[in-house]
Amino acid sequence: MNAMCDIAFLLFIFIMVISVFKETAPDQFEAAESQQAQEAVPVLELYIQEDGTVWCGGPVSDSQIVFLWQEKQASAEGAATALYAHKSCPYKYVDRVQSLLKGAGCSDFIFAVEKK
């Protein structure tokens, strides 16, 4: 009888775990559609190296990043900023640059990735 209780308890746990997986993964997923495709042309392109160095025609400091964005934003309001990160770049460097730009008022970003 004791062994049957153990088996029933394990079966109960198994069913609970399986039901959680089914809830988080939908059977069919349809992507949103758009009537018109918009092509975003970035006003500023920043390249983040794997060591965290930011390039825009050469290495730039944090204050220069904000200055470049403000200068470009004045000429093309509402345009996006493109962030290109090296594939070995830790995300903390991308987040640092994004936080700098958000602090300056930038809200539109394009993250460039390579499809695998």
Image (cartoon, helix red, strand yellow):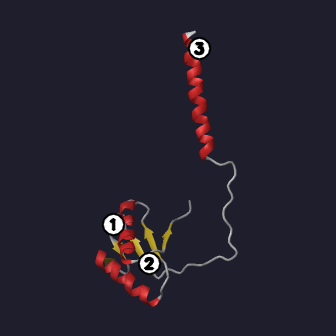
Which residue is tagged 3? 4
Residue under label 1: 52
Can you see residue 58?
no
Q: Is residue 77 left or right of residue 11?
A: left
10 Å crowding of disc 3: few (<14), some (14-19), many (20+): few
Query: Where on the picture, by quarter, is residue 98?
Result: bottom left
Label 1, label 2: how many angstroms apart (C-alpha)?
A: 15 Å
- Give the amino acid type for the residue marked by disc 1 in the picture: Gly
Q: Nearer the viewer, mark 1 or mark 3?
A: 3
Mark 2 or mark 1, which is nearer the start of the sequence? 2
Front one among 47 and 76: 76
Label 3 and label 2: CA atoms lie apart by 65 Å
On the image, the x and y values in percent for residue 59 come to 32, 76
Label 2 near label 3: C-beta < 8 Å?
A: no
Q: Position of residue 102 (x, y in %)?
A: 39, 73
Q: Residue furthest top?
A: 1
Q: Are marks 1 and 3 in contact (CB under 8 Å)?
A: no
Q: Nearer the viewer, mark 3 or mark 2?
A: 3
Q: Nearer the viewer, residue 36 or 86?
A: 36
Q: Is residue 29 visible?
A: yes
For the residues marked 1 and 3, what is the alpha-carbon distance in whole angstroms?
58 Å
Q: Residue furthest bottom?
A: 75
Relative to 31, does residue 7 appear above or below in the rendering? above
User: Which x, y percent locates residue 25?
Assistant: 62, 47
Q: Earlier in the sequence, mark 3 or mark 2?
A: 3
Comparing 102 with 110, the one in front is 102
* Relative to 1, residue 59 above or below: below
Going 42% across and 89% down the picture, which residue do you hit? 74
Could you tell me which quadrant the N terminus lies in?
top right
The amino acid at mark 2 is Glu
Q: Residue, x 39% and y 66% (percent of image)?
A: 94
